[in-house]
């Protein structure tokens, strides 16, 4: 804004902002100038001196403030007395009257001047506030004089018209009005000024356009007011650019037209009503299903077209007209002919251009076919759930878009949890994968989703609630969307822990049998070698002697020599065969490892149970806690335990006992602290002959009608090969106890 008319206020404000010392110094200077003039200029008489000092007081109080004015008054009083009254030898009474009058007049002048300064300051503050409001206003504010030249042009106006205030002030307002509207604008302003009202809104019945500095026209709204000061009229207009509003209104009109087109051509039953339930637009499907013979329902009343409409639906219409959004996704509609139809409908209000409710829209869709399909799907799901329950399969469903997972109750039960104990989260499943299986399983899932694997089927381990791991066989499949992108992955889990255990037991049994067969062959070869080695050696030796004698001239060397030579060759060949056999049989080296003997005893018991040899008999384990591990081959030592268990069971069965117990103990003794001692005690036949207790470990020794009698010999040989000993003792009551020792790992 232009404040050139208010320079006086600016000067006053300037002096008010100065330090007190400067202001009081100027007050002293003003009085000093008056005193010097009075003293040095002869023409200045007594009365003029008083006026001169009054002038100094008034100017000081006006420009510098009341306090400097009071100082000027006091100094002026002293100067008047010293320079005028005392030299004139004024009487005491006159002196008192003149001093009192001087002080009174000075005080009145200071008070009047101070009031004027406060009024000026208040006016200045009011003008500054007005200027601040005008400059910060979001709307453009323009003031024009009676000659329609611009006197005020705020920042919003600068932004709106693309013109600075300096360029606009003093110029005619016509510059910002399109040429075709200028004459009408001039007439309008004159009529408005003559009419006498202070303000009115322009453009209520017609659009008003403005003209930017670059020549662009734009729509606006305007409110104009007038005021008259000192006989001069001015007009102030508040302008708002409504370009965006017009664009929104046009967009709304276009959207409504598009909505009408959409409703008319929609494949659903849709109708749009006004507040009185008159049809505005309907879809073709609505005409077909609810038209009651009309080809076009526009402007017809819904209740007149459907006089039998229910009170329930009338209530729905009232609620929707009040602003509620109502819907029903599963509403049964029984037609007059008794046919049943399932409908999904919605009723909701629509808004007009001013934001009010203009009526309601009702949409309706016949979902009978879908409802039938859903019923069939539910039936199929129930059947599938029954099958899954019967085979104890855990069902899982993973949404690949939201990463949500569903885990069935059986899935959770397989790892020891009730349904509410475990959350349906991907992290719950992933965190329970065995560390050795984790990478394999996650890679298989990723590759299957990416299409690199044709099927998803694998076995892995999940941590049970008790901390142990269960073997799971999982098979899954992918569901894809219409673009063939993976949508969901789902499948079933089967607990195959028992199956894996049986399979492992069978594999261990096969390995033990292979080891046993190897030991049998070894022991057999050893026995044969032991039986044949001396005769073969003797044959070889005698043959060499005979050959030597014959070659020395005794008997008939020509006849005996070839025969004896053949005998020696054959004997030597037999020895070579035996040695080769032993070499081959001992080619497999024994694998040595650290073994928990208590765990091995439990494994052997599981094998015997799996073979079904126990029947009514029982094997009890009395295992010492904290035993150090022993060193050896677990398969061979497990075979030793299985042999001892089976021999004990067979011994009790041959004794005619229908039920009994074999006790297995592990411990270390004071006599052999570096060895673990295992004892298998049965309740079978009593063996009173000490020789029998020793012979039972010899190869081919048996008291049974069947068998080779090699089990105990092999067992003893295996124990001795591991650095231990095996022996048998008669129990105090019935049966025998077989003991063996094994060295601890050092």
Image: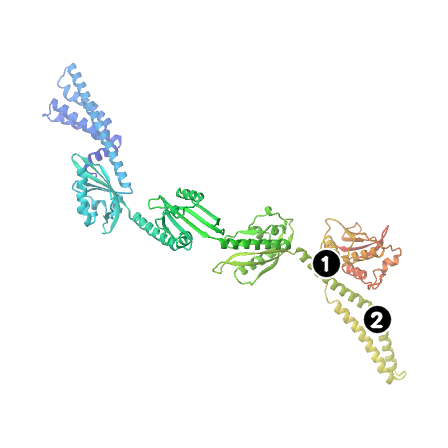
Q: Which mark is residue 634?
A: 1
Image coordinates of residue 243 in percent, x first then y, are: 29, 48
Q: Residue at x 28, y 43 (%)?
A: 139
Q: Quadrant of residue 240?
A: top left
For label 2, count other residues whose C-alpha is less than 10 Å away and answer few (under 14), some (14-19) or many (20+): some
Q: Nearer the viewer, residue 105 or 194?
A: 194
Q: Is residue 373 shown left or right of residue 308?
A: right
Q: Is residue 521 shown left or right of residue 504?
A: right
Q: Which colouring convention does the figure follow? A: rainbow
Quadrant into which the C terminus falls: bottom right
- The residue sitting at the left extreme is 43
- Element class at badge 2: helix
- Element class at badge 1: helix
Across the whole image, how many numbered discs are drawn on residues? 2
Q: Which mark is residue 612?
A: none
Q: Earlier in the sequence, mark 1 or mark 2?
A: 2
Q: Is residue 326 shown left or right of residue 6?
A: right
Image coordinates of residue 395 in percent, x first then y, are: 59, 54
- The residue sitting at the right extreme is 555
Q: Nearer the viewer, residue 593 or 540?
A: 593
Image coordinates of residue 510 in percent, x first then y, are: 72, 62
Looking at the picture, does residue 673 appear above or below residue 519?
above
Q: Which mark is residue 532?
A: 2
- The residue sitting at the front extreme is 337
Query: Which of the two discs, 1 and 2, sits closer to the camera?
Result: 1
Find the distance from the CA under tag 1 to the CA under tag 2. Answer: 34 Å
């Amino acid at each position: 804004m232009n404040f050139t008319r208010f320079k006086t206020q600016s000067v006053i404000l300037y002096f008010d902002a100065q330090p007190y010392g400067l202001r009081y110094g100027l007050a002293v200077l003003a009085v000093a100038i008056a005193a010097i003039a009075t003293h040095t200029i002869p023409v200045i008489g007594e009365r003029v001196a008083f006026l001169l000092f009054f002038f100094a007081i008034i100017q000081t109080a006006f420009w510098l403030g009341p306090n400097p004015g009071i100082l000027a008054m006091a100094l002026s009083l002293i100067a008047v007395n010293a320079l005028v009254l005392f030299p004139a030898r004024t009487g005491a009474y006159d002196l008192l009257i003149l001093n009192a009058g001087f002080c009174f007049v000075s005080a009145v002048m200071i008070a009047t001047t101070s009031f004027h300064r406060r009024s000026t300051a208040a006016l200045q503050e009011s003008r500054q506030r007005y200027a601040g409001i005008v400059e910060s206003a979001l709307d453009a504010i323009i003031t024009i004089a009676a000659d329609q030249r611009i006197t005020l042009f705020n920042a919003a106006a600068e932004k709106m018209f693309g013109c600075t205030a300096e360029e606009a002030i003093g110029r005619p307002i016509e510059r910002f009005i399109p040429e075709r509207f200028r004459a009408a604008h001039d007439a309008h302003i004159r009529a408005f000024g003559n009419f006498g009202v202070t303000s009115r809104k322009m453009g209520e019945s017609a659009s008003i356009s403005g003209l930017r500095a670059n020549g662009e026209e734009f729509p606006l709204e305007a409110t104009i007011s007038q005021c008259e000061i000192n006989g001069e009229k001015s007009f102030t207009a508040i302008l708002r650019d409504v370009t965006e509003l017009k664009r929104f209104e046009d967009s709304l009109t276009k959207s409504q037209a598009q909505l009408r087109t959409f409703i008319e051509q929609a494949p659903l039953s849709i109708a749009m009503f006004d507040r009185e339930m008159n049809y505005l637009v309907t879809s073709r499907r609505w005409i077909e299903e609810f038209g009651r013979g009309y080809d076009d329902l526009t402007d017809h009343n819904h209740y007149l077209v459907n006089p039998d409409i229910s009170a329930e639906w009338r209530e729905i219409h009232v609620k929707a007209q009040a602003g509620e959004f109502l819907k029903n996704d599963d509403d049964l509609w029984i037609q007059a002919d008794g046919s049943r139809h399932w409908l999904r409908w919605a009723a909701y209000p629509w808004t007009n251009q001013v934001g009010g409710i203009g009526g309601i829209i009702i949409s309706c869709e016949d979902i009978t076919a879908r409802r039938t399909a859903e019923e069939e799907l539910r039936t199929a799901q129930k059947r599938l759930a029954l099958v899954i329950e019967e085979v104890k399969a855990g069902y899982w469903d993973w949404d690949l878009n939201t990463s949500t997972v569903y885990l069935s109750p059986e899935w959770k039960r397989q790892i020891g949890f009730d349904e509410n104990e475990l959350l349906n989260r991907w992290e719950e499943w992933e965190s329970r994968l065995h560390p050795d299986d984790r990478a394999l399983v996650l890679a298989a899932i990723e590759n299957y989703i990416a299409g690199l694997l044709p099927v998803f089927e694998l076995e892995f381990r999940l941590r049970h609630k008790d901390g142990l791991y269960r073997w799971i066989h999982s098979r899954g499949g992918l569901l894809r969307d219409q673009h063939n992108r993976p949508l969901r992955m789902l499948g079933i889990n089967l607990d195959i822990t028992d199956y894996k255990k049986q399979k492992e037991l069978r594999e261990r049994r096969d390995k033990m049998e292979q080891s046993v067969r190897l030991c049998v062959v070894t022991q057999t070869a050893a026995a044969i070698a032991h039986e044949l080695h001396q005769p073969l050696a003797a044959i070889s030796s005698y043959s060499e002697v005979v050959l030597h004698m014959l070659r020395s001239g005794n008997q008939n060397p020509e006849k005996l020599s070839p025969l004896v030579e053949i005998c020696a060759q054959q004997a030597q060949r037999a020895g070579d065969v035996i040695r080769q056999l032993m070499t081959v049989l001992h080619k497999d080296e024994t694998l040595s490892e650290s073994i928990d003997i208590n765990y091995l005893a439990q494994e052997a018991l599981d094998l015997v149970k799996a073979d079904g040899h126990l029947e009514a008999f029982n094997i009890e384990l009395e295992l010492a806690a904290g035993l150090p591990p022993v060193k050896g081959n677990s398969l061979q030592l497990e075979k030793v335990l299985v042999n001892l268990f089976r021999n004990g069971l067979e011994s009790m069965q041959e004794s005619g006992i229908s039920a009994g117990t074999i006790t297995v103990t592990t411990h270390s003794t004071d006599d052999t602290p570096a060895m673990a001692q295992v004892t298998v005690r049965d309740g079978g036949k009593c063996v009173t002959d000490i020789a029998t207790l020793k012979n039972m470990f010899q190869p081919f020794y048996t008291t049974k009608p069947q068998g080779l009698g090699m089990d105990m010999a092999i067992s003893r040989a295996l124990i001795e090969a591991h650095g231990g000993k095996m022996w048998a003792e008669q129990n105090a009551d019935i049966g025998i106890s077989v003991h063996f020792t094994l060295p601890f790992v050092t």
